[in-house]
Amino acid sequence: MNKFAQSNFQVPLSATVEAFIQESPSIFTLRLQLCDSTARDEYSFMPGQFNMLYLYGIGEVPISIVSDPVDSTLIDHTIRVVGRVTEGLAKLKVGDEVGIRGPFGRGWPLALARDKDLLIVTGGLGCAPVVAAINFALNRRAHYENIHIVQGVKHSDDLIWREQYDRWNQMNGVEVLLAADAAGPAWPFHTGQITELLDQVTLSDDSCLVLICGPEGMMKAAAEKLIDDGISPFSIYVSLERNMQCAVGHCGHCQMGPDFLCKDGPVFVYPDVRHRLMQEGI
Protein backbone atom coordinates (compact mmCIF):
# COMPACT_ATOMS: atom_id res chain seq x y z
CA MET A 1 0.00 0.00 0.00
CA ASN A 2 1.49 3.36 -0.96
CA LYS A 3 1.77 6.43 1.28
CA PHE A 4 -1.29 8.07 -0.26
CA ALA A 5 -3.46 5.00 0.37
CA GLN A 6 -2.17 4.65 3.94
CA SER A 7 -3.39 8.15 4.76
CA ASN A 8 -6.75 7.73 2.99
CA PHE A 9 -7.72 4.09 3.53
CA GLN A 10 -10.75 4.65 5.76
CA VAL A 11 -12.59 7.68 4.39
CA PRO A 12 -13.50 7.74 0.69
CA LEU A 13 -12.40 10.75 -1.34
CA SER A 14 -14.94 12.31 -3.70
CA ALA A 15 -14.43 11.75 -7.43
CA THR A 16 -16.37 12.98 -10.43
CA VAL A 17 -17.47 10.81 -13.34
CA GLU A 18 -15.68 12.32 -16.34
CA ALA A 19 -16.85 9.68 -18.83
CA PHE A 20 -19.15 6.66 -18.91
CA ILE A 21 -18.31 4.09 -21.60
CA GLN A 22 -20.67 1.18 -22.29
CA GLU A 23 -18.38 -1.69 -23.28
CA SER A 24 -21.10 -4.37 -23.59
CA PRO A 25 -24.65 -4.86 -22.28
CA SER A 26 -23.31 -5.80 -18.83
CA ILE A 27 -19.86 -4.15 -18.76
CA PHE A 28 -19.01 -0.45 -18.55
CA THR A 29 -16.03 1.77 -17.83
CA LEU A 30 -16.09 4.70 -15.42
CA ARG A 31 -13.47 7.39 -15.96
CA LEU A 32 -13.07 9.21 -12.66
CA GLN A 33 -11.19 12.27 -11.45
CA LEU A 34 -10.61 13.09 -7.81
CA CYS A 35 -12.33 16.34 -6.88
CA ASP A 36 -9.60 17.66 -4.60
CA SER A 37 -6.59 19.00 -6.51
CA THR A 38 -4.12 18.05 -3.76
CA ALA A 39 -5.45 14.49 -3.73
CA ARG A 40 -5.05 14.35 -7.53
CA ASP A 41 -1.42 15.42 -7.25
CA GLU A 42 -0.67 12.83 -4.55
CA TYR A 43 -2.55 9.90 -6.06
CA SER A 44 -0.49 7.21 -7.79
CA PHE A 45 -0.91 3.52 -8.53
CA MET A 46 0.76 0.57 -10.20
CA PRO A 47 -0.83 -1.79 -12.74
CA GLY A 48 -2.66 -4.58 -10.94
CA GLN A 49 -3.79 -2.50 -7.97
CA PHE A 50 -7.44 -1.75 -7.22
CA ASN A 51 -9.64 0.91 -5.66
CA MET A 52 -12.68 0.57 -3.46
CA LEU A 53 -15.47 2.49 -5.22
CA TYR A 54 -18.12 3.80 -2.83
CA LEU A 55 -21.63 4.57 -4.03
CA TYR A 56 -23.11 6.92 -1.49
CA GLY A 57 -25.93 5.35 0.50
CA ILE A 58 -25.49 1.89 -1.05
CA GLY A 59 -22.00 0.51 -0.38
CA GLU A 60 -18.63 -0.12 -1.98
CA VAL A 61 -16.91 -2.69 -4.15
CA PRO A 62 -13.28 -3.45 -5.14
CA ILE A 63 -12.61 -2.54 -8.78
CA SER A 64 -9.34 -2.94 -10.70
CA ILE A 65 -7.74 0.15 -12.22
CA VAL A 66 -7.37 -0.28 -15.98
CA SER A 67 -5.75 2.99 -17.01
CA ASP A 68 -2.03 3.71 -17.41
CA PRO A 69 -0.35 5.27 -14.35
CA VAL A 70 1.28 7.84 -16.64
CA ASP A 71 -1.87 9.96 -16.19
CA SER A 72 -3.18 9.17 -12.72
CA THR A 73 -5.44 12.23 -12.73
CA LEU A 74 -7.95 10.24 -14.82
CA ILE A 75 -8.63 6.83 -13.29
CA ASP A 76 -10.47 4.22 -15.38
CA HIS A 77 -12.37 1.29 -13.86
CA THR A 78 -14.05 -1.36 -16.02
CA ILE A 79 -16.99 -2.89 -14.18
CA ARG A 80 -19.33 -5.82 -14.73
CA VAL A 81 -22.86 -5.57 -13.33
CA VAL A 82 -23.11 -8.40 -10.80
CA GLY A 83 -24.81 -6.97 -7.70
CA ARG A 84 -26.47 -4.10 -5.89
CA VAL A 85 -23.50 -1.70 -5.86
CA THR A 86 -22.43 -2.33 -9.45
CA GLU A 87 -26.05 -1.97 -10.58
CA GLY A 88 -26.03 1.47 -8.96
CA LEU A 89 -22.69 2.40 -10.52
CA ALA A 90 -24.11 1.44 -13.92
CA LYS A 91 -26.72 4.19 -13.53
CA LEU A 92 -24.19 6.99 -13.01
CA LYS A 93 -23.91 9.85 -15.46
CA VAL A 94 -21.15 12.28 -16.33
CA GLY A 95 -20.87 14.81 -13.51
CA ASP A 96 -22.08 12.43 -10.78
CA GLU A 97 -19.83 11.77 -7.79
CA VAL A 98 -18.61 8.55 -6.18
CA GLY A 99 -16.13 7.82 -3.41
CA ILE A 100 -12.67 6.31 -3.86
CA ARG A 101 -10.50 4.53 -1.31
CA GLY A 102 -7.13 3.30 -2.46
CA PRO A 103 -5.15 2.27 -4.32
CA PHE A 104 -4.72 -1.07 -2.57
CA GLY A 105 -2.90 -4.34 -3.07
CA ARG A 106 0.26 -5.56 -4.70
CA GLY A 107 0.44 -5.02 -8.44
CA TRP A 108 2.21 -6.71 -11.34
CA PRO A 109 6.06 -6.77 -11.09
CA LEU A 110 6.58 -5.18 -14.49
CA ALA A 111 10.07 -4.02 -13.56
CA LEU A 112 11.11 -7.69 -13.68
CA ALA A 113 9.97 -7.88 -17.31
CA ARG A 114 12.26 -5.13 -18.53
CA ASP A 115 14.26 -6.30 -21.57
CA LYS A 116 12.34 -9.59 -21.56
CA ASP A 117 9.43 -11.11 -23.43
CA LEU A 118 6.08 -10.44 -21.76
CA LEU A 119 3.21 -12.94 -21.97
CA ILE A 120 -0.20 -11.85 -20.72
CA VAL A 121 -2.86 -14.56 -20.46
CA THR A 122 -6.39 -13.64 -19.47
CA GLY A 123 -9.63 -15.58 -19.50
CA GLY A 124 -13.32 -14.86 -19.20
CA LEU A 125 -14.63 -11.42 -18.40
CA GLY A 126 -12.05 -10.95 -15.65
CA CYS A 127 -9.47 -9.28 -17.89
CA ALA A 128 -9.54 -5.86 -16.19
CA PRO A 129 -6.60 -6.55 -13.81
CA VAL A 130 -4.20 -7.01 -16.75
CA VAL A 131 -5.44 -4.16 -18.94
CA ALA A 132 -3.41 -1.60 -16.97
CA ALA A 133 -0.33 -3.81 -17.39
CA ILE A 134 -0.93 -4.02 -21.14
CA ASN A 135 -1.34 -0.25 -21.42
CA PHE A 136 1.74 0.27 -19.26
CA ALA A 137 3.91 -2.01 -21.41
CA LEU A 138 2.66 -0.75 -24.77
CA ASN A 139 3.20 2.87 -23.75
CA ARG A 140 6.79 1.95 -22.80
CA ARG A 141 7.39 -0.32 -25.75
CA ALA A 142 11.18 0.14 -25.81
CA HIS A 143 11.50 -1.41 -22.33
CA TYR A 144 10.27 -4.86 -23.42
CA GLU A 145 11.02 -7.44 -26.08
CA ASN A 146 8.06 -9.24 -27.68
CA ILE A 147 4.66 -8.81 -26.05
CA HIS A 148 2.15 -11.66 -26.38
CA ILE A 149 -1.48 -11.11 -25.35
CA VAL A 150 -3.65 -14.24 -25.15
CA GLN A 151 -7.33 -13.70 -24.35
CA GLY A 152 -10.03 -16.33 -24.02
CA VAL A 153 -13.78 -16.02 -23.46
CA LYS A 154 -16.59 -18.55 -23.01
CA HIS A 155 -18.54 -17.26 -26.01
CA SER A 156 -17.38 -15.03 -28.82
CA ASP A 157 -20.14 -12.54 -27.95
CA ASP A 158 -18.42 -11.95 -24.58
CA LEU A 159 -15.34 -10.34 -26.14
CA ILE A 160 -15.04 -6.62 -25.41
CA TRP A 161 -12.40 -4.19 -26.69
CA ARG A 162 -12.29 -5.90 -30.11
CA GLU A 163 -11.01 -2.72 -31.81
CA GLN A 164 -8.40 -2.32 -29.09
CA TYR A 165 -7.11 -5.85 -29.64
CA ASP A 166 -6.93 -5.20 -33.39
CA ARG A 167 -4.93 -2.03 -32.78
CA TRP A 168 -2.53 -3.77 -30.41
CA ASN A 169 -1.98 -6.61 -32.88
CA GLN A 170 -0.76 -4.15 -35.51
CA MET A 171 2.02 -2.83 -33.27
CA ASN A 172 5.59 -3.96 -33.88
CA GLY A 173 6.56 -6.92 -31.75
CA VAL A 174 3.05 -7.39 -30.35
CA GLU A 175 1.03 -10.58 -30.89
CA VAL A 176 -2.64 -10.93 -29.94
CA LEU A 177 -4.27 -14.36 -29.90
CA LEU A 178 -7.98 -14.72 -29.17
CA ALA A 179 -10.07 -17.79 -28.38
CA ALA A 180 -13.68 -18.61 -27.56
CA ASP A 181 -14.94 -21.86 -26.09
CA ALA A 182 -18.08 -21.43 -28.20
CA ALA A 183 -18.10 -19.22 -31.29
CA GLY A 184 -20.70 -17.57 -33.46
CA PRO A 185 -20.62 -17.98 -37.26
CA ALA A 186 -18.63 -14.78 -37.83
CA TRP A 187 -15.88 -15.54 -35.27
CA PRO A 188 -12.55 -15.41 -37.16
CA PHE A 189 -10.28 -16.56 -34.34
CA HIS A 190 -9.56 -19.81 -32.50
CA THR A 191 -12.43 -21.88 -31.16
CA GLY A 192 -11.45 -23.93 -28.14
CA GLN A 193 -9.58 -23.65 -24.84
CA ILE A 194 -7.21 -20.75 -24.21
CA THR A 195 -4.43 -23.19 -23.29
CA GLU A 196 -4.46 -24.45 -26.89
CA LEU A 197 -3.28 -21.00 -28.02
CA LEU A 198 -0.17 -21.21 -25.84
CA ASP A 199 1.36 -23.66 -28.33
CA GLN A 200 1.47 -20.76 -30.81
CA VAL A 201 3.55 -18.55 -28.50
CA THR A 202 7.34 -18.77 -28.68
CA LEU A 203 9.05 -17.71 -25.45
CA SER A 204 12.57 -17.79 -24.11
CA ASP A 205 12.35 -19.92 -20.96
CA ASP A 206 15.00 -17.86 -19.18
CA SER A 207 13.98 -14.40 -20.42
CA CYS A 208 10.25 -13.90 -20.03
CA LEU A 209 7.63 -12.84 -17.53
CA VAL A 210 4.09 -14.25 -17.53
CA LEU A 211 1.00 -12.50 -16.13
CA ILE A 212 -2.19 -14.57 -15.81
CA CYS A 213 -5.65 -13.44 -14.76
CA GLY A 214 -9.04 -15.15 -14.89
CA PRO A 215 -10.88 -18.11 -13.37
CA GLU A 216 -8.64 -20.15 -11.07
CA GLY A 217 -9.04 -23.32 -13.15
CA MET A 218 -7.87 -21.52 -16.27
CA MET A 219 -4.95 -19.88 -14.47
CA LYS A 220 -3.78 -23.18 -13.03
CA ALA A 221 -4.10 -24.99 -16.37
CA ALA A 222 -2.22 -22.23 -18.22
CA ALA A 223 0.53 -21.99 -15.62
CA GLU A 224 1.07 -25.75 -15.50
CA LYS A 225 1.24 -25.98 -19.30
CA LEU A 226 3.82 -23.21 -19.43
CA ILE A 227 5.87 -24.96 -16.73
CA ASP A 228 5.68 -28.21 -18.72
CA ASP A 229 6.95 -26.22 -21.71
CA GLY A 230 10.01 -25.09 -19.76
CA ILE A 231 8.98 -21.75 -18.24
CA SER A 232 10.16 -21.27 -14.66
CA PRO A 233 7.25 -21.15 -12.19
CA PHE A 234 8.98 -18.15 -10.59
CA SER A 235 8.49 -16.25 -13.86
CA ILE A 236 4.71 -16.70 -13.64
CA TYR A 237 2.44 -14.33 -11.71
CA VAL A 238 -1.30 -14.67 -11.13
CA SER A 239 -3.96 -12.24 -9.92
CA LEU A 240 -6.50 -13.77 -7.52
CA GLU A 241 -10.03 -12.68 -6.75
CA ARG A 242 -11.89 -12.95 -3.45
CA ASN A 243 -14.58 -11.07 -1.52
CA MET A 244 -12.72 -7.90 -0.50
CA GLN A 245 -14.76 -5.71 1.84
CA CYS A 246 -12.26 -3.62 3.80
CA ALA A 247 -9.15 -3.70 1.54
CA VAL A 248 -6.77 -3.48 4.51
CA GLY A 249 -6.82 -7.02 5.93
CA HIS A 250 -9.16 -6.32 8.84
CA CYS A 251 -12.41 -8.06 7.90
CA GLY A 252 -10.88 -11.40 6.88
CA HIS A 253 -13.25 -12.03 3.97
CA CYS A 254 -10.44 -12.32 1.44
CA GLN A 255 -8.16 -14.57 3.50
CA MET A 256 -6.58 -17.41 1.52
CA GLY A 257 -4.44 -19.57 3.74
CA PRO A 258 -1.94 -17.27 5.48
CA ASP A 259 -2.51 -14.37 3.09
CA PHE A 260 -5.07 -11.60 2.79
CA LEU A 261 -5.54 -10.98 -0.91
CA CYS A 262 -6.38 -7.31 -0.45
CA LYS A 263 -2.96 -6.45 0.98
CA ASP A 264 -0.68 -9.46 0.31
CA GLY A 265 -2.06 -9.78 -3.24
CA PRO A 266 -3.99 -9.76 -5.43
CA VAL A 267 -0.87 -10.54 -7.48
CA PHE A 268 1.25 -13.51 -6.37
CA VAL A 269 4.19 -15.37 -7.84
CA TYR A 270 2.74 -18.72 -8.89
CA PRO A 271 4.70 -21.05 -6.56
CA ASP A 272 3.32 -19.18 -3.53
CA VAL A 273 -0.27 -20.13 -4.40
CA ARG A 274 0.21 -23.13 -6.68
CA HIS A 275 -1.28 -25.65 -4.24
CA ARG A 276 -4.09 -23.38 -3.04
CA LEU A 277 -5.82 -22.81 -6.37
CA MET A 278 -9.07 -24.70 -6.82
CA GLN A 279 -9.00 -25.81 -3.16
CA GLU A 280 -12.21 -25.18 -1.20
CA GLY A 281 -12.02 -23.88 2.34
CA ILE A 282 -8.62 -22.19 1.98
Image (cartoon, grey):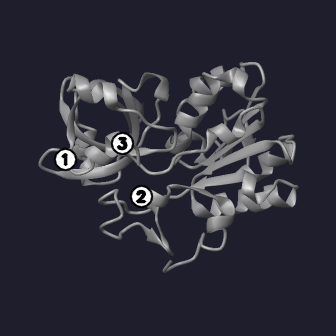
| Closer to us: 168 or 91 | 168
Instruction: Judge depth for marks 1 and 3 and give the one in front.
Output: 3
Residue 249 can be seen, yes or no:
yes
Tell me the number on the disc at residue 160.
none
User: Residue visible at 35% across and 70% down?
Assistant: 252
2 or 3: mark nearer the eye: 3
At horizontal 43% and vertical 22% (from top left) the residue drawn is 71
Q: Going from the N terminus, do you reach mark 1 or mark 3 first?
A: 3
Q: Say which of 83 and 255 sits in front.
A: 255
What residue is shown with label 3?
Answer: 3
Give the secondary structure at mark 3. Answer: helix
Q: Are marks 2 and 3 in contact (CB under 8 Å)?
A: no
Q: Mark 3 is on which residue type?
A: Lys
Instruction: Assign a secondary structure to mark 2.
Output: helix
Q: Which mark is residue 11?
A: 1
The quadrant in which residue 273 appears is bottom right
Q: Where is mark 2, residue-wise?
A: 262
Nearer to us in this view, 133 or 94: 133
Type of amino acid at the residue the image marks with label 1: Val
- Tell me if mark 2 has few (under 14), some (14-19) or many (20+) residues whose alpha carbon lies within 10 angstroms of its own: many
Q: Residue at x 83, y 53 (%)?
A: 231
SS for callout 1: loop
Q: Are marks 1 and 2 in contact (CB under 8 Å)?
A: no
